[in-house]
Amino acid sequence: MTIQEVPLPAVSAGTVLVQNHYSLISAGTEGSTVKAARKGLIGKARERPQQVKQVFDVLKQQGPAQTYRAVMKKLDAYSPLGYSSAGVVIDVGKGVKNISVGDKVACAGAGYANHAEIISVPENLCVRLRQDSDLQLACYNTLGAIALQGIRQADLRLGETCAVIGLGLIGQLACLMLKASGVRVFGIDIDRAAAETARKHCCDAAFLRTGHAVEEEIHRLTRGMGVDAVIITAASSSHDPINLAGAVARKKGKVVIVGDVPTGFDREPHYYKKELDLRMSCSYGPGRYDPLYEEHGLDYPPAYVRWTENRNMEAFQDLIAGGRIDLSYLTTHVFKFADAPRAYDMMMERSEPFMGILIAYDIGKTIKRGRIEIKGHDRGPVSSVNIGFIGAGSYAQSQLLPNIPKNAGVSLKGILTATGTGARSVAERFGFDFCTDLESEIIENDAINTVFIATRHNTHADFVQKSLKAGKNVFVEKPLCLHEGELNEIENLYKALSKKQADKAAGGQTPLLMVGYNRRFSPLGREIKNNFPGGPLAMVYRVNAGHIPKDSWIQDIEIGGGRIIGEVCHFVDFLTFLNGSLPVSVSAQAMEDVNHLNDVLVVSLKYENGSIGTICYFANGDKALCKERVEVFANGCTAVLDDFKRLDIYAGGKKKTKKYLSQDKGQKAEVSQFIDAVKNGKPSPIPIHQIFSASRVCFSILESIRTGQTIVNS
């Protein structure tokens, strides 16, 4: 655990930049995270068996080298803590309507409302507060919304009774709000101090969980009926909370699970005979885990969804501001931000009693955007390839950065990512001179001549154009762009730059533009091309693509562009590479799908040299089948490529086989050849007309699916 100086987060559309005054440490959620982080590899594996299974799946498919990179990327990355805070807005992004600079706000969300001086939070995960609000109390925001959603699931009425099992922070908050709403509240916990605190501040009665005394006492207090509802806010691997809930609930009562407890209850004698209603409560409320709501700011109409996660947060803050609940007793410790690690040590070691642990920030500190130098990494300017990175997600860390040659002619200068922790983590791991939160530090930096772009797809076109205009060589992960208008702009810009360079008397070179179509650089792919030097080819590319949920950013037309733009472009480029000419006509059909994802489709291509190609892209297959198979037929010969690990070539009645232990899709060779081209003034490893063609063909595929017509490409 460490406190790091990192670049400021980006202020993207729909987000607000907040200077935190206070943030709340969640002893339950964060405690389990820290506990797992402090374990060795074996302990981590035992904590996360599902992730271990994923490691073995990747190992079987991609081999040990790529699996090791993927695992270490996860283990070595900084993981910010915290998800509930309060502060003052210092900037707002485009499209934010209800929050302004200077507003006090309470914030929520893991990955957003972090323990950090400055955070960037989507508008729907912020609540605007009254200017006289106490931010020390407001920072309980997230836990308050979680507790309130559990209460809503219990659907209680004035005068009814509720038992709350688990009297940590969420349990105490639930009791406070239940009592404020006129519900009679009984609290239960295995910790004597928690039960005593609840009895004093928020419960009509509170009990230590011992034997059957709790059940008997609650039945006595409810005149033998049992409680109308039970809310379980405890976190435990034991079945006792769920079975105790069944024992104290009345017939046809409700049991609501808020905490992390197993649901394998005893059917007899309570749940079956009482016909109990068991309900799950989903975090802060409706909207949680919905990217359209949380990331894109789409609200649900109050007439149909009265209580969203944002409206739950508002209601909780109104209870605080109106004095209807008093949280002040919950805060037992306040640590300065610089002392935050001590707070976690105290919490993990339980060296003293605690309840609410807050982090207080120095609000008088001046914070500016700009670069952060990484000590010990500055190797000075070099004469050939000085690299800046914009974006560095999973693919960049596993396939691009590890493959950049480590020699005296190459220098990793600066990196910019959407999150400060990500930028700092990658900068340290791969040896960048600095990390930054300003794109000008990369694009307008005279010490950088080459820019790698590995951001989300909707930003590619803009970064490509800015970098080319600045005279930088550009490597952009696929796709080049999302819309035909963007493609036209990039083409026109590149032509203008080429003409300008050609008109210069001294000569020179147009900046290189390269798109990450790595498969054409795979050794087995090049082996196929070498064995089919002439004659039109008949080609079939079958892709067992696998399912991607409709709410993934990749499927989002505005962000990822969908799977045709985002991935099928790979296969279009590979077939173009194999036959050496461009497609002249495109015909495509997609299987009908209620979500209109177009991820089960067949594409037919005809080429200038008479070759034909078919791409069968299927997202509805079994993952046990290899992902990619390519078959090529010409002049009495056939090549069959399986997953870029095995190649069989049939010719003259004989079969020749080449295979590797690990998959090689050409990423290393791709990066190496691009760096070599920059260093030695060579053309782009992929001809520019083929780069533009791959994008245009993908747009034609979409048009063909929409119209049912064959699209002719000029």
Image (tube, helix red, strand yellow):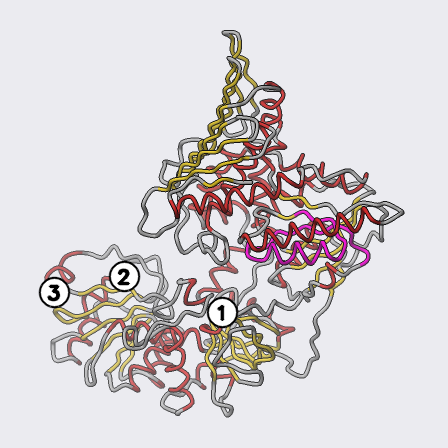
Instruction: Indicate the secondary structure of the residue bearing disc 3.
Output: helix
Q: Which residue is mark 2?
A: 240
Q: Tell me what residue is drawn at x 52 percent, y 64 percent.
A: 111
The answer to whether residue 600 is above or below residue 111 is above
- The label shown at residue 6 is none
Residue range corresponding to the magenta coloring: 446-475
Q: State left or right for residue 669 relative to residue 410.
A: left
Compare marks 1 and 2 and give the one earlier in the sequence: 1
Q: Amino acid at mark 3?
A: Lys
User: At which x and y percent is residue 616?
Assistant: 42, 34
Instruction: Indicate the secondary structure of the residue bearing disc 1.
Output: loop
Task: State the CA–CA distance, disc 1 to disc 2.
Answer: 29 Å
Q: Residues within 10 Å of mark 2 (few under 14, many from 20)?
A: some
Q: Nearer the viewer, residue 248 or 499?
A: 499
Task: State the CA–CA distance, disc 2 to disc 3.
Answer: 18 Å
Q: Nearer the viewer, residue 710 or 398?
A: 710
Q: Amino acid at mark 2?
A: Asp
Q: State left or right for residue 62 relative to residue 491.
A: left
Q: Tell me what residue is drawn at x 50 percent, y 20 percent.
A: 633
Compare marks 2 and 3 and give the one earlier in the sequence: 2
Q: Which residue is mark 1?
A: 83
Q: Quick check: marks 1 and 3 in contact, CB under 8 Å? A: no
Q: Amino acid at mark 1?
A: Tyr
User: At which x and y percent is residue 664?
Assistant: 59, 31
User: At which x and y percent is residue 655?
Assistant: 51, 11
